[in-house]
Amino acid sequence: MSQNGKPKFAMYWAASCGGCEIAVLNTHEKILDVDANFDVVFWPVAMDAKYKDVRAMPDESITLCLFNGAIRNSENEEMAHLLRRKSKILVAFGSCATEGGIPALANLSSTREILDTAFQTPTTQNPEGLRPNPKWKSGEGEITIPEMWSVVRSLDQVVPVDYYMPGCPPESHQIAAVLDLVIQALQGKAQLPPAGAVIGAGNSSVCDECPRKRNEKKIRKFVRIQEIQTDPDLCLLEQGILCSGPATRSGCTALCPQAGVPCVGCYGPTEGAIDIGARLLSAVASVIDSTDPAEIDRILDGIPDPAGSLYRFNMAGSLLQAGKTAWEEEKHAAHNG
């Protein structure tokens, strides 16, 4: 508890885009309940906060910490360990924290390949071939920047996590419901779910929330959504558009399919699924209208960017986790200490 008797609240932004922060603010007047019931002690995007202030806090003095973003570099990892130590309840908040998110697609490449793309392409003016240097000695002393890790990880691959709240970002109405539950639990009016639970989401699939009409699916060709005039009432997968709905956890109210665009899997795998890509590929295989291996290959070749389509938000949390070049670089770095 803080000096004013309120439980302490923190929110941190690691390797992510900031959308999770906006989603919290989009709870509208519910954000006032956070201020009324919590002492906000650390939220760098919304207040002037210093890492040294967190280090000075007693362990487990933060009641609730929402940690969004993947673990991409040394700073992210340091803050994950620090906030785990200082927090009673640590929530992996959003797709990047729960599954690695978009940043984890970088696991298909080595850091050298990533930096070459960023600093040595026709669209980049860098005649001296400069690269980020974690340490630099200047007249004022040694300057340091975070060191980029070879493999992006989800939060629970670095520290223990109490709860998981998926979404890119989590839907604001789900955030509001979770905040209500936590506040009521702190007041002794409700109980928190068991540790390790997924909160702010459903237990079925996006298809179960989707109002589009579903028939027996028979696919002979995959197309991109801009290539056809879609039927506004028919299941997108039946129209040959890859939709992750069958493999994705419910809770978003199927907002994307209702708007005419396919689900991309941001709420993570359905309950009990070990790997969202394998679950989605299984669903796709079951609706391909062919038994000829050559034709099946041709149909599957119509899926653009298979890795990005099957694991857009879930690479770090998948069985694959990373590509060969990233793992080799990780192994080499560990060997060299």
Image (cartoon, rainbow, N blue to C red):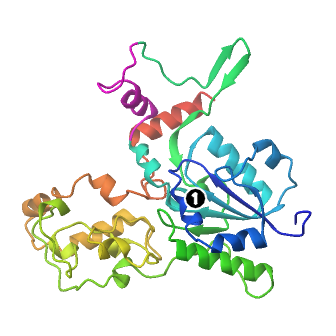
Q: Amino acid at mark 1?
A: Glu
Residue 115 in the magenta stretch? The answer is yes
Foreground residue among 16 and 294? 16
Compared with 177, 137 (above or below) is above
Residue 206 in the magenta stretch? The answer is no
Question: In the picture provided, is 224 more to the left or to the right than 126?
Answer: left
* Element under disc 1: helix
What residue sits 15% from the left and 62% below the top? 223
From where the camera sits, is residue 154 visible? yes
Question: In the picture provided, is 3 more to the left or to the right than 226?
Answer: right
Question: In the picture provided, is 240 more to the left or to the right than 12?
Answer: left
Compared with 187, 131 (above or below) is above
What residue sits 63% from the left and 38% below the top? 74
Foreground residue among 144 and 288? 144
Q: Position of residue 324 (x, y in %)?
A: 39, 41
Compared with 51, 251 (above or below) is below
Q: Which residue is mark 1?
A: 21
> How would you rate the neighbour count of disc 1 (Cα within 10 Å): few for under 14, some for 14-19, many for 20 or more?
many
Compared with 15, 137 (above or below) is above
Foreground residue among 243 and 110? 243
The residue stretch that appears in magenta:
109-127
Q: Position of residue 5 (x, y in %)?
A: 89, 69
